[in-house]
Every structure is written in C-alpha cells, then in structure tokens.
Image (cartoon, grey):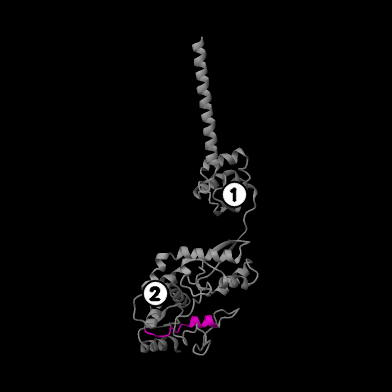
Amino acid sequence: MLRLMIQALKVVAVLALAAAIVVTAQRALSHYLSVASANASGEPITFVVEESESVDSVAARLHEADLIRSATYFKLRMRLTNRDSQLKAGRFELRKGMTVNEIINTLTTAEGVEVVQVRFQEGWRAEEYADKLVEVGLISTPEQFLDAIRSGTWDREFLGSRPSGASLEGYLFPDTYEFRADATPEDVINTLLDTFDTRVPAELRARAQALGYNFHQVMVIASIIEREAVVPEERPLIASVYYNRLRAGMPLQADPTVQYALGQPGNWWPTVTDPNNEAADSPYNTYTHPDIPPGPICNPGLAAIEAALQPAQTDYLYFVAKGDGSGTHAFARTLDEHNANIQQYTQP
C-alpha cells in the first residue's frame, strides 16, 4: 500500500513538474512572440496600411519589416482581442522594439501620420527647394529653409571639402520625398543629406582624387553639367570639356553659372545675353573668372555626379547647342571648329 502511495506521489510530482514546464514554456513563448522584434533600438518606421487590406497581408509585411517575430502570433492576437475588424488604413509611425499589443493598438486606434509628398527636381537651386516647401505648406517662408542650409552644422563625411561658411547647395539630393506634416527644415535637410550619402556612396566619391580635385570641386562641375546637359549620353562629354579647359588654363565659360549669379525670385534662371558684362564681378561668372566657382550652382542628380566623376576621354574644348529641338550639342577641339559649328547651328 505504501509503495502504491509513493508511486502515486511520484506520478503527481511528475505531472506537476510537467505542467509547470508547460506553463513556463507557454509564458516564455508568449513573451518572446509579444516582443515584436529583437531589435529594440526604437528606430521609427513609417508603415502604410492600404484601404481594405487584410490582417494576413499586414501581418506578413510587419514580419518582413522586422517589426514582429511571428505573423501567425500577430494574427492570433488580432482575432483573440476582436481587433481584426478594426484595422485602420493610413500611415503609422511604428518603432522597432514595440510589443505586438502596442503595434495592434497603434494600427487600430491611432490616427494615421499625415505626410506631405515633395518632388525636388534635378538642377534646382536651393531657393527653388525653399519655394516648393512653401508651396506644399511645410514652411511659411523660404528663409526658414535657406537660413538652415547656410548656418546649420551638418556633420557628414562628404561635406569635408566644402569651404567653411558655404551653404549646402549641391548636396540636397533631388528626389521624391515624403515628410511628416510637422517636419522642420532641419528634418528635411537631414533626410536630403542622408539620401545623398546613400545614393552617392564613398567609393564613388573617392574618384575625385584621381581627377586631381577635391569632392566639392567635382560637385561644382556636376552642377554645371546638370544645367547644361539635356541628352543623357552627352553628360560625360560635357564633363570632359570642362576638365580639358581647366587643364588648359581656360575659363569654363558656362552660361548656367552666370544665370546662377543673376537669378532673382520669380526668375531663378534668367536668359544670358552678354555674359562678359552681366554679373561680371561675381565669382560665379565663369567668363570673367577663370577658376572653378566657389560652390555648386544647383543640386545635381546622380547621373550628372557620375559624369563629373567619370568623364569621357576626349580632346574637346568647346560645345554649342544645335538648336534643332533634340537637345544635343556639337563638340569641337579647336576654336576654328567651334566657330564653324556656331555658324552652322546658330546663324540664320
């Protein structure tokens, strides 16, 4: 009898231990799955829920974004808490490290983050960026943005060769962006600079040294190429002309630099009729000043930057627009050839 009692107690003890293990394991698993991600950095991520999107789809995308550990657990929690019918459409700011319940609460009760889409065109100068930001309502006056790019402290490796006191003209990477409606000018600028750092990586920027110039000087050339080139395949050719002229001690004689010096609100790129006399004292007049201008004249896109860093190998020293609507240019090695091209393409 005693033996049977001892055996029964052993069985009870084993069952109790097993139950405890199961409960502990369940709790551990539940805790593991409820902590959305192993990355608890708090890094903000904008997550978009589309109209009529299913819980299954949202769960899958949350998992892909490393915001949750298990799509299945997320769907189960949504259904157990009767939230599957409360999913809202919109843009939400989530953070890595949020729990599943916090994410569910955000996606079912919070108002979506209001965002503003902005397109900054290749070849725009900073003032045009500021005008666009006023237009979409992110700032009230252009000066809010322009003062920030001229006076802010911006710690980026690629800005190292930029002269002291220079603005960020040239480094505000043109692209289509989405900003929070309450974004500050500094928020916008940091996003533009971060995009520049990603799209123009260090290994590409390093090519400047092989050309014999620092990166800031190459960005000046890239900005001029952006304003001169129309046909993509001509960008490296135009780059070669400018580098050839610099090596020969010739002024760049680029009309867009004079336009930059003459630009005024409402007409940032005026027509140049007499470049030797218009804005003649400006260091941006590359007819009257033989050196590279002190800074970029616009914010070039990646193609122009690549052309400036990888110019074609030519003997060209001149080019003139053909004026036939194609956007192409006639290139020349000598002044006589250039004058003949001018006669052919610009004279009536």
Give the x, y percent position of residue 347: 44, 89
- Closer to the N terminus: mark 1 or mark 2? 1
Residue 332, label in figure? none
Q: Which residue is drawn at 61% across and 48% down?
A: 107
Q: What element carries label 1?
A: loop
Question: On the rendered structure, is 88 left or right of 197?
Answer: right
Instruction: Find the magenta span and give its range.
Output: 248-261
Which corner quadrant of the image does residue 262 belong to? bottom right
Give the x, y percent position of residue 234: 40, 75
Based on the picture, tell me whether residue 8 belongs to the magenta stretch.
no
Nearer to me, 259 or 207: 207
Pointer 2: what residue?
A: 236
Residue 52, label in figure? 1
Amino acid at the residue labelled 1: Ser
Amino acid at the residue labelled 2: Pro
Using a 10 Å C-alpha cutoff, classify the residue at mark 1 as few (fewer than 14 neighbours), some (14 to 19) or many (20 or more).
few
Residue 255 visible in image: yes
